[in-house]
Structures are given as C-alpha cells and as structure tokens.
Image (cartoon, coloured by chain):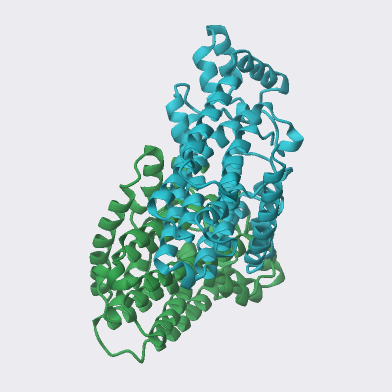
Chain colours: A cyan, B green
C-alpha cells in the first residue's frame, strides 16, 4: 500500500545521507569521537524528518536542493537526542545495533550527542544558500530548530519524571510526547516552509499537520514497543515496561483495570529486573483491557486531524506524499 | 593588585546575571528541569567569558547593552559544558555546591545541559538588536559560538581519551586545552568584536589574544586543581590526579622523573580509590620535579603572547581591562 511512499523515502534518504556523510567527515579527530557521533546515523533510520521537511518545502514551491542542509540538520538533531535518550533510558540496542554509550562509554556518548547538536547549527549556517533563502529566513530556520530542541528537552524531562508517577493523565502524556516527538516534526515542516518562502498561513497549516502527525507517530511507536517484531523494530520489545514509561497504553490500562490487575501492572512497570514472562503477562493484561486498540484509535484520530490541515492545498504530488506519510505513521509495523 | 578588575568583573556579572535570570525564567515546566538547568548558574562563577566578550566589544566601540544577549549566551554555553563535564568526570562538587547530576540524577543533568545549549542560540536569536547588529553579523556570532562548541567537544573527548594514555605530549595537551577552554575564550572575543562592527584585522587580534589567554587560564586551572585551597576553589583538590588527567604538570613530571618516581606517579594517577595520602605524595613528587614552576612559566609565556596581540590598540580603559584580565589569569588563586 505504501510502496510509492517507501520508494520516495528511500530516494530522499540517499541524497540526505550523502550530505550527512560529508558533514560528519569534517570532524575526524579524535577518531573515536568521529565514529561515535556517526554510529547511529550510519546504522539506518528512515529519515522521516528530512522527508517531511523537503516535502513541505516542495509543496510550497521550493526544491530539494535548497532544503538539503536543513534536511540533514533535522536528522542530526534527531540523532543527537537519540544518543542522549539511550543513555538516560539505559537502552542497549537501537536500529539493530548497540547504542553509542554501549559501544563506547557514557562520556563519549554525551560528547558525541553534543557534537551532533553543534553540527545542526553548523550545517544550516555554513551550507544554506544565503542568497536564495535570505539571512532573515536562515535565522527563522535556526529559531524553529532551537524551539524544537527546547520542547524536546522538556518532553524528555517529563518522560523520565513520569516514570516515578502513577497519576499521569492522558493530557500529561499528550503534552509530553508533543515535546519529545511532535515538536521536531513541526520544526521540520516549518523549516521546509520557510525555505520555500511560504506564506505564514500555509506555514502554520503545515506546522499543525506535522505536529498532529507527530503525536500519532509517537503513540504508534509506543504500541510497537509493546507489540512489534523485535527484528524489524531493531530494539527489544517490552523495554518501555521495564523502564516504567507512562505510555497511553499504560495510562488507559490503569484507568480501566481492576484492583488486582492494577497491582500486577504496577509490580512489573519500572522493574528493570522483571522477567520476560512477567513483561509478557502485563502486556497481555493491557491488551485484554483493549488499551492497544484505544491507543490506535487515538493515533488515527490525530492523523485525521493532521490531514484536515492539508485540505486547503491543491492536489499535487507533494500533498499526496504528505497524506501518505501521515497514514503510514499509523499503519507502519516498524 | 587586581581590585579594580575584580570590581569591574563584579559589575558586569550583576548585569549579565540579571539577563540570565530572565532567560532561565522562561522555562519553568517541569520545575526540576528549571531548577537543574539554573543550579550551577546560580551557584556563582566569575562570568569571565561575558566580561571578555563585553570588554572586546567596548574596545572596538560597542556598548554593554548591545552585547548583553551574547554575553549571557557564552555563559550559558560554558555552564552547559560544565554540567556535562561533571557527569563525564564523575565530579561531585563545583563552585562549592553539589554538581547537577549529584543533586538530581544523570538523566536530568544531561537534559539540563542540552536545554542550556539550546538557550545559547535562543538568547542570541531572540534578544539581539537586529537592526543595530544586522542579520549577517548575528549569523556570524552564532557561527563562532558553534565553532567554539565543536572545539569544546573535541577537547573534551581528547581530555577523556588522554586519561588512558601515558604518552601524551605537551603539544597534545596544548591542542586539547585549546579546544576544551581556549576556543570559547576566542569565540567570546570574536562575538564581542562582531557586535561592535570591528574590522577583520582587529577581530582577529582579539581572537588571538583571547585564545592565548585561555591557554594560560587552563594551565593555571590545572595548577590550582593540585595546589589550590579547596574552599576558595569550590571543588576537591587532587581530583584531577584520581581521574588520571594528563595536565601539563603530569606531562612534565613524567618527562623528568626517575624510573621509581614514574612507577609511583602512575600507580596513583587515574586510581579513583587512591587515598588522600597517596594523592598528596604524588603532588609532592611532581612539585619536587619543578613541574608546577614549569607549568607556571608556560602560562606566563602564553599571557605575554596574548598581551602582544593587544599592542596595536590605543591605550584606553577597555584595553587596560583586557591587559589586567590576562595577567589575572596567571596570578589568581581560585
């Protein structure tokens, strides 16, 4: 169903990856830092944010070429947050390979993330076509990337703080994933729109589309983290349960469960020593409470809202891609 | 001797601190993140980098007011690196208070550092006077801050990697502290010069002055880490020895020592369980090899080189301050 989209994603990836390679090749001393900071970038990833950025740019009349430095930049930003998140969550595997702090150590992983973050700005400032985009607009791109990062920090802090709380509401969760995930989707769309020289109204529509899509994306990510296939997922299933993540599925389960089920869920949630059997049992309980289905319905609702924001745009190829992309976010299996 | 300079530093601090307070007050949710990211900033610090920036700006005809957002920004940048460095070095005390990861935890400390880093850009972009400074120059300020940060990451990675090596040369060390410390001094001077609308030649002179001063500053920092007074220093004396830091004092000692002394030094260097007595003994050995005096002479030589770069500037108050500042870097006791 998404064959065309996947081909498009793949094509954009190739161009973006070539640019990213060029950017990370600038910093080769010390070699460990070079390898550590490029490790996750080279391990794969779908390059959804660069695709979102370049497609929004095209929708408003811009070109891939003009958007390329910023497209690479949002992927650098995303990877910087992944490296730091993996340390915080003590995750050992991502994209089917060891995480950076597992392969190197925590100091090298922290510094690698910091380096990629600096490269976000370096890439946009050094490689953007100043004459075509204009200095004022380059500052606007940097501003939206910065606001996206501040939102990510807030979301990430909330995500970690929520692990210790049993009273996290659905609203709290949406606010948290809005920062952790949806904000960078929004920044990507906004950067693309700015590069194209889009009108404020169109830019704002694309931001809303991207933010809502990002919420759906994260809800589905949380579902896949429980129900997905470890191999296609590239990370262990159920680690969210052991880490005590307050996902929508957990929140809905705690809302609907019996006293006895609550006790069973909370005894395993956040217990890093829980056995595979205990984790599977808790996932089974949450599934029996229809929490997975509930989360899926919420994700679908956000995608529908996202799609509504695209309505005013004329039917053309970039719009079709954005529609497919949002639908793909809920339909995907990895 | 430095009374006038210390008064000037204090006056600039007050203005910069007020601005920093305003910037960190914008982000109060979640409260833990707000407190953690402001913790070290509120614990003191001499605000040397903002002072350097504003004084370079004044030397080239600019004002404190025009430079204030960037001055706050370099302090945010410095504090972001301190928070992350303290995690990497497992340091528990700084500026006389517990470090951020000690008071909160490692995830909150990583995120706090990331937040401050994002605020570096947020502050310059949002608060700089665009009409007075110009968008092109604001991009130049962001670029020098970014280059400074990339250099810090390289220096920090080298600093950690050197801990495992016994063959670190004086040249390696200078290269490492050039990144870890001197680069941000240079970026501060450059930003100040850009804000003032300085000519490239003058900007470049101030960069060289700041970079050389920064090298001297770090060498003296390493001396104080061994010989200083714990109370005025705000952190434990000798922690560099336990962490195995390859300071100039260590490098010079390993170059001059006997076979037996080498064995004694290396048995304590990098040994986190070394007793206070063992650390004191090793410091005594290094002192007896005249390594402290050697490092001090190198620092003085760098200050003299720094001062030479100021020669072409007319004698005025900002120049006097920059001369005093460089001399203070080697004379200070904390």
What's the residue at 50%, 62% (across, down)?
A: A121
Q: Position of residue A19 (x, y in %)?
A: 64, 63
Q: Position of residue A204 (x, y in %)?
A: 41, 47
Q: Is residue B182 left or right of residue B322?
A: right
Q: Is residue B170 left or right of residue B48?
A: right
User: What is the count of numbered marks?
Assistant: 0
Say which quarter of the image contains residue B254. Answer: bottom right
Residue B245 in view, yes or no = no
Q: Position of residue B159 (x, y in %)?
A: 59, 63
Q: Is residue B276 above or below residue B163?
A: above
Nearest to the observer: residue B191 or residue B283: B191
Spot the residue most to the front: A315
Say which quarter of the image contains residue A221. Answer: top right
Spot the residue most to the right: A231
Q: Quadrant of the C terminus of chain A?
A: top right
What's the residue at 23%, 65% (across, down)?
A: B11
What's the residue at 39%, 65% (across, down)?
A: A136
Residue A61 in view, yes or no = yes
Q: Is residue B319 above or below residue B239?
A: below
Nearest to the observer: residue B79 or residue A233: A233
Nearest to the observer: residue A184 or residue A310: A310
Q: Position of residue B96 (x, y in %)?
A: 38, 51
What's the residue at 61%, 26% (across, down)?
A: A241
Nearest to the observer: residue B182 or residue A330: A330
Q: Quadrant of the N terminus of chain A?
A: top right
């Amino acid at each position: 169903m998404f064959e065309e989209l996947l081909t498009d994603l793949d094509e954009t990836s190739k161009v973006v990856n070539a640019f990213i390679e060029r950017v990370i090749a600038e910093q080769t001393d010390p070699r460990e830092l070079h390898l550590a900071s490029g490790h996750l970038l080279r391990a794969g990833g779908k390059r959804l944010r660069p695709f979102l950025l370049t497609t929004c740019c095209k929708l408003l009349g811009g070109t891939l070429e003009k958007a390329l430095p910023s497209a690479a930049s949002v992927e650098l930003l995303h990877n910087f947050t992944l490296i730091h998140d993996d340390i915080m969550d003590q995750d050992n595997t991502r994209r089917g390979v060891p995480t950076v702090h597992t392969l190197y150590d925590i100091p090298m992983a922290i510094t690698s993330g910091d380096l990629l973050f600096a490269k976000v700005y370096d890439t946009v400032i050094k490689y953007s076509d100043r004459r075509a985009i204009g200095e004022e607009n380059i500052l606007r791109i940097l501003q939206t990337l910065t606001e996206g990062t501040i939102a990510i920090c807030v979301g990430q802090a909330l995500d970690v703080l929520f692990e210790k709380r049993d009273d996290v509401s659905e609203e709290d969760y949406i606010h948290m994933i809005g920062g952790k995930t949806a904000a960078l989707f929004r920044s990507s769309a906004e950067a693309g729109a700015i590069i194209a020289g889009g009108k404020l109204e169109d830019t704002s529509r694309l931001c809303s589309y991207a933010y809502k899509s990002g919420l759906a994306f994260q809800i589905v990510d949380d579902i896949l983290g429980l129900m997905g296939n470890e191999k296609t997922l590239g990370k262990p299933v159920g680690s969210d349960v052991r880490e005590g993540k307050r996902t929508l599925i957990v929140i809905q389960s705690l809302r609907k469960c019996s006293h006895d089920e609550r006790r069973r869920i909370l005894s395993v949630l956040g217990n890093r020593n829980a056995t595979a059997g205990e984790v599977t049992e808790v996932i089974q309980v949450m599934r029996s409470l229809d929490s997975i289905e509930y989360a899926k319905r919420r994700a679908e609702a956000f995608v529908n809202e996202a799609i509504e924001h695209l309505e005013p745009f004329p039917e053309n190829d970039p719009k079709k891609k954005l529609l497919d992309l949002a639908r793909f976010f809920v339909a995907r299996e990895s």
